[in-house]
Amino acid sequence: MRAVTWTGVNEVSVETVPDPTILNARDVILRVRRTTTCGSDLHLLGGYIPAMRTGDVLGHEFMGEVVEVGPGVRDRRVGDRVVVNSFIACGACWYCRQELYSLCDNGNPNPGITEGLWGQSPGGCFGYSHAMGGFAGSHAEYVRVPYADVGSFLVPEEVSDDRALFASDAVSTGWMGADLAGTKPGDTVAVWGAGGVGQMAARAAMLLGAEQVYVVDRLPERLEQVRRHVGAEVIDYSTTDVMAELRERTGGRGPDVCIEAVGMEAHSTGVQGVYDQVKQQLRLQTDRPSAVREAIMACRKGGSVFVLGVFAGPVDKFPLGAAMNKGLTLRGAQVHGQRYMPRILEHMARGELTTEHLATHVMPLEDAARGYRMFKDKEDGCVRAVFLPHG
């Protein structure tokens, strides 16, 4: 079959790779109908995530049709149209029973790498390096889905492929951030990053009852999507002082909830931005934490900060003193998507949550290298490149 493989730093290609097969009784094989790039994929391309190997198949956000079912699968049938969460979870371990699915004890068959990095290992993730399990990704004609009864969800008839696709990761990640940050009716929420995850975090905050929602970014096409499709207010950090702007709009107090949805390659203005960029390019640090810093400094006393963007290692100039002395609640996680996807699909079916606008560039799988370049360089207003493996 054809698949998009990692061939080196900032390089991908479409290659012929072996078809996936059922390896365990709870597997299904999925014919991929839609799969999309994600901002965290760019960290793989940039070489900031360890344990990538030449020939690894990329992609972790996808939906499709079940074409083969393992003997231990109970709830999926050949022909089912499903959307699959990006993180792989068994559904039975202690963490899964607490609905902390991305921390599954059984989802990652290579725990040693991340245990060395972080002390313990999270679950596995499709197409996200051998540190996260070495699973083949979804930028392919077919993909093996382990623990299919746990991680795949039937798409309602009312929900199109293009809408369902983003329940896989962008919406479920954004929803988790808004929920676990403790968003309550009447809250003021600020989100850093207007990509797919940031937009969906803002929309989730609104559906959870937030009274005011602000999204911080610098790219005009993304800020326009926030206005038009999400309905939140926007702040262009390249033209204003974000801290001062948020204080003014909240009567001097600051947001109740701040959500960082940028990750390790955050851009920022001024000396701080140059400092972070140079250190990262020299590999003196893996992550640029400027958005996290600003979220902590902007949050009101006693408020909540949630880190949704992907980070890999230690960061410099972390404002721990501000977090402690302001009494902030600071949390982060990879997506516990299985916890949220049924509710998300219900909102999608009722038309309360739309995502088609995120697919700004739809193309065949053969054009993946061009799609990744456009996505990385933000060419032609690219917010997401969506690949159609079967035309």
Image (tube, helix red, strand yellow):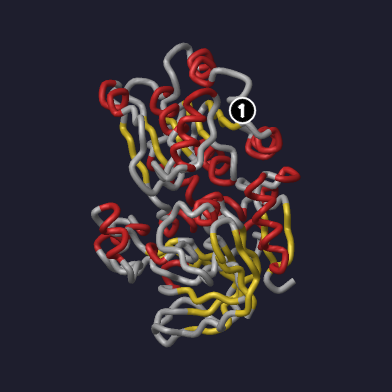
In the displayed structure, would residue 177 be above or below residue 13?
above
Q: Nearer the viewer, residue 144 or 18?
A: 18
- Going by the image, does 344 lie left or right of 2? left
Residue ID for mark 1: 234
In the displayed structure, would residue 263 be above or below residue 82?
above
> Where is residue 181, by image quadrant?
top left
Quarter of the figure with the N terminus: bottom right
Query: Disc count in the image?
Result: 1
Q: Nearer the viewer, residue 336 or 264?
A: 264
Give the x, y percent position of residue 349. 61, 55
Q: Is residue 344 visible?
A: no
- Going by the image, does 246 lie left or right of 184? right
Give the residue type that dot 1 points to: Val
- Residue at the farthest bottom position: 71
In the displayed structure, would residue 83 be above or below residue 183?
below
Q: Nearer the viewer, residue 225 or 240?
A: 240
Quarter of the figure with the C terminus: bottom right
- Residue at the farthest front position: 282
In the displayed structure, would residue 340 be above or below residue 133?
above
Give the x, y percent position of residue 78. 56, 82
Q: Is residue 104 visible?
A: yes
Give the x, y percent position of residue 61. 55, 60
Element at badge 1? strand
Residue displayed at 65% across by 56% down? 372
Residue displayed at 43% across by 59% down? 338
Residue displayed at 64% across by 76% down? 2
- Going by the image, does 138 lie left or right of 313? right
